[in-house]
Image: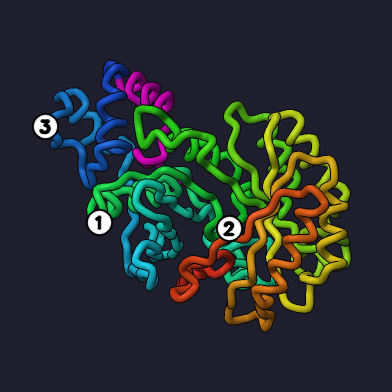
């Protein structure tokens, strides 16, 4: 895949300059132009860059800009949630979401075109998998959201959640490169503690993340309290069953000295009973854990429904009485299919 300026970590940018016999001290100016000033297009004529850098950027073997074009924008009725449909260089499309309020805006980014995990209630999982995104394509989404935020509100991004299209930990190295760039103090400077990585329980990726130097928030999709229940919703549970997943999460919490967040999508008549709540609390007993309860958001190819608000409250009361902290996630953007599990770009490019 072609190297892009958006996808170069600062140290990699220094190395590319040095290899071209350009003083690597100029990496700061190039990185700043891309990641902080958000300058678009060809940088070879940018006056703040010195002639040796301009000549390097104009060379045939120089890194290119990431081709990312907004083809649609859908604002939610709340005025703050916006869904962006973004076309990539090969014609494939992904969706990103801007959400939040002034002073605390969040970007929800995609990590893959489609998804291989096949979760039955997730619109992306219903698409199937096309390809991985490069680090530059992940970063470019965040820069696009940041650019729009500055235009619309004069605001900056405060948080990033890797909860868009795809299984982030199934695309580990590009994801880590992208997050290293986005948390770099010379760029957008998003604090690592303000970055959340969601996974459906891809155990090899959790183990890799355990060894990564930076400590990001880990959010694990659970949705079932037994292998039989969970396997009907999340097919990879057959490969990495609950016992192995939870053992890995406990180890992660201990190694990283961090709380693990668990997502539980509440589906009426499927996993929302008192018994489910009690068994969920028992599963996570003794772990530094927090549960995010998410009433099901509708998708075209899944007939399930969200439970009534009273049932959601009753479920939460049971797990909280058992000593398990929890939050009911505020539903945002579901009127424009921008909610959790609803992202589904129109175009896949099969590889």
In the rendered image, which residue does mark 1 sit on?
152
**Element assignment for label 2:** loop
Q: Name the residue under label 2.
A: 166
Q: Residue 95 at x, y = what percent?
A: 45, 63
Name which quarter of the figure residue 296 lies in: bottom right
Q: How far apart are marks 1 and 3 (CA)?
A: 27 Å
Question: Cα distance, mark 2 to mark 1?
Answer: 28 Å
The colouring scheme, among rainbow, by chain, secondary structure or one colour, is: rainbow
Q: Name the residue under label 3.
A: 47
Which of 20 and 315 lies nearest the eye of the viewer?
A: 315
Q: Of tags 1 and 3, which is closer to the observer?
A: 1
Quarter containing the C terminus:
bottom right
For image coordinates 47% across by 40% down, the residue present is: 178
**Cβ–Cβ below 8 Å for labels 1 and 3?**
no
* Residue 68 is inside the magenta segment: no
Q: Give the range drawn in magenta.
A: 1-20
Which residue occupies 66% across, 36% down?
A: 209
For label 3, the SS is: loop
Q: How crowded is mark 2: few (under 14 residues within 10 Å), some or many (20 or more)?
A: many
Q: Residues within 10 Å of mark 1 (few under 14, many from 20)?
A: few
């Amino acid at each position: 895949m072609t190297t892009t300026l958006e996808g170069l970590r600062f140290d990699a940018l220094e190395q590319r300059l040095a290899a071209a016999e350009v003083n690597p001290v100029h990496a700061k100016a190039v990185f700043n132009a891309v990641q902080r000033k958000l300058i678009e297009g060809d940088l070879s004529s940018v006056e703040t860059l010195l002639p040796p850098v301009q000549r390097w950027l104009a060379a045939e073997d120089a890194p290119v800009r990431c081709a990312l074009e907004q083809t649609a924008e859908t604002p939610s009725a709340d005025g703050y949630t916006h869904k962006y449909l973004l076309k990539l260089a090969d014609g494939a499309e992904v969706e990103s979401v801007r959400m939040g309020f002034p002073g605390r805006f969040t970007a929800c980014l995609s990590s893959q075109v489609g998804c291989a995990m096949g979760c039955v209630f997730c619109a992306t999982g219903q698409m199937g998998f096309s390809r991985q995104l490069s680090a530059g394509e992940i970063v470019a989404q965040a820069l696009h959201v940041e650019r729009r935020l500055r235009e619309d509100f004069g605001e900056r991004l405060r948080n990033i959640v890797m909860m868009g299209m795809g299984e982030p930990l199934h695309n580990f190295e590009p994801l880590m490169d992208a997050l290293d760039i986005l948390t770099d103090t010379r760029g957008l400077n998003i604090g690592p503690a303000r970055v959340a990585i969601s996974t459906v329980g891809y155990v090899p990726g959790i183990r890799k993340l355990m060894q990564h130097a930076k400590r990001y928030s880990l959010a694990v999709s659970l949705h079932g309290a037994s292998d039989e229940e969970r396997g009907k919703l999340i097919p990879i549970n057959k490969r990495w069953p609950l016992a192995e997943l939870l053992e890995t999460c406990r180890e992660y919490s201990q190694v990283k000295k961090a709380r693990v967040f668990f997502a539980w999508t509440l589906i009426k008549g499927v996993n929302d009973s008192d018994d489910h709540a009690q068994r969920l609390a028992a599963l996570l007993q003794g772990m530094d854990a927090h549960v995010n309860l998410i009433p099901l958001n509708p998708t075209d190819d899944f007939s399930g429904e969200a439970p009534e608000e009273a049932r959601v409250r009753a479920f939460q009361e049971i797990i909280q009485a058992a000593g398990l902290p929890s939050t009911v996630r505020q539903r945002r953007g579901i009127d424009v299919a921008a909610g959790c599990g609803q992202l589904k770009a129109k175009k896949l490019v099969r590889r």
